[in-house]
Image: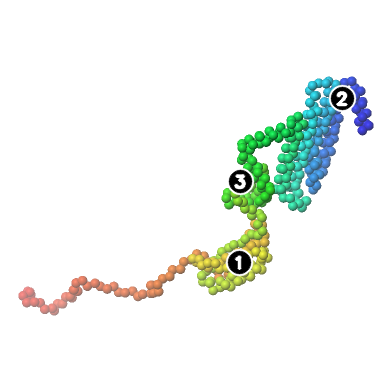
Amino acid sequence: MEYLTEFKSWISTYESWIIQVVVAGVITTVIHFGARVLLARLDKKLENSQKLWDESLVYAIRLPLQVIIWLAGLMWMANIADLETKAAIFQGVSRLHELMVMGVLSWTIIRFVNRLEKRFLAIGPRVMQSKVDPTTAMAISKLVRVIIFFVTGLVILQAAGYSLSGVLAFGGVGGVAVGFASKDLLANFFGGMMISMDRPFKVGDWISSPDKQIEGTVEYIGWRLTRIRTFDKRPLYVPNSMFTSISVENPSRMLNRRIKQVIGLRYCDAGVMGEVLADIRSYLASQPEIDDNQLSMVNFISFGESTLNFQIYCFTRTCDWSKYLMVQEDILLHIVEIIHSHGADIAFPTRTLDLPEGLFGQTEQEPVQRQDSPPAQPEDSNAEIPAGQGG
């Protein structure tokens, strides 16, 4: 501090205030580059760090600190010039300086919140083992940003000389008009708040709606809309207000996956149906991938047109789609082996033609000759000729 006091006294001995302004600018520049190098090294050192708060804080103050340094330097130079020139242009510098400092501080806090949110979504749940899910983290960061904007705006207006009571009164009247003009926007806003509070789904969940053609993985929940990535990798943007009027399924939160299959045996295998069902029940009871705490059934259920139908109903322990398909495949293949082991087989559509007995077993009948006129007599050379007719 003594060196700084001596330096200021040495500067004040110069008759020309311009030299003082130039020296102040040089000092500001040196401090600026020194802080820039220091923060760059800290940022690089903490870039791959698992410490979320430290890295986020260094990132947040890196640019705003440089702005603060220049604001302080410019204020110093302006005060030097004001003392010497008494120019009117420097009359409002002090108030402008306060407003800009408030804005920079708000900018710093917003940068810190944004960076902390980004880092938390990237590595936070894994490193911190936190129960805060990404959707809650995003909702909290949005709320903090809104509060910062609101408070900063009020503080700046008060510092600028406006009455807060008048501003709030105007905001109440204007809010009614804005509410009528942008009711859809407000509906989406409150829809987003309800999603954040009720949490029917979160980022990363697979959701679907039986009321609308909505199905896919949630990628982003914003103030106005939610972005869903469909299974064909297309982005689907849904207004948040829609979720207040439709039902939403969240398969990501199911505890088990269900296997429900109907298999048909041939009618000629009716005698071994009971044995087949008993073996399948025993197999499912011994299968480790089947959850024995859930309902499991194997029953003969119906007579089909060409099949004797039985149903398999059980639940797997896993909810992973790929693993579930592998478990179901193994179970169905083993059921086929059980069926074949009893000499039975899976039926396919067939039809039986039942004909009357002996329809094709009759002997061929000789045709009956119809006699509509007397049969012709054979000629006899010795036949008697009536008298008077011979020659």
Label 1 SS? strand
Mark 2 to mark 3: distance in Å?
Answer: 64 Å
Quadrant where the C terminus is found in the figure: bottom left
In this picture, is 90 found above or below 379?
above
User: Residue at label 2?
Assistant: 20
- For label 1, the crowd category at 10 Å Cα-Cα, with few meaning under 14, some 14 to 19 and many 20 or more, is some
Label 3 SS? helix
Mark 1 to mark 2: distance in Å?
Answer: 92 Å
Q: Residue 130: horizontal and vertical position, in percent?
A: 76, 51
Q: Name which residue lies at 81% across and 44% down.
A: 54
Q: Name which residue lies at 74% across and 52% down.
A: 131
Q: Nearer the viewer, mark 2 or mark 3?
A: 3
- For label 3, the crowd category at 10 Å Cα-Cα, with few meaning under 14, some 14 to 19 and many 20 or more, is some
Indicate which disc residue 242 carries.
3
Res. 221 visible in picture? no
Mark 1 to mark 3: distance in Å?
Answer: 39 Å
Quadrant where the N terminus is found in the figure: top right
Q: Residue 268: horizontal and vertical position, in percent?
A: 51, 71
Task: Identify residue type, mark 2.
Answer: Gln
Task: Identify residue type, mark 1.
Answer: Met
Task: Identify residue type, mark 3.
Answer: Met
Horizontally, residue 200 falls left or right of residue 115, namely left
Indicate which disc residue 388 carries.
none
User: Residue at label 1?
Assistant: 297
Does label 2 or label 3 sit earlier along the sequence?
A: 2
Question: Which quarter of the picture shows residue 284?
Answer: bottom right
- For label 2, the crowd category at 10 Å Cα-Cα, with few meaning under 14, some 14 to 19 and many 20 or more, is many
Q: Nearer the viewer, mark 1 or mark 3?
A: 3
Horizontally, residue 237 falls left or right of residue 145, namely left
Q: Residue 197: horizontal and vertical position, in percent?
A: 68, 48
Does label 1 or label 2 sit earlier along the sequence?
A: 2
Does label 1 or label 3 sit earlier along the sequence?
A: 3
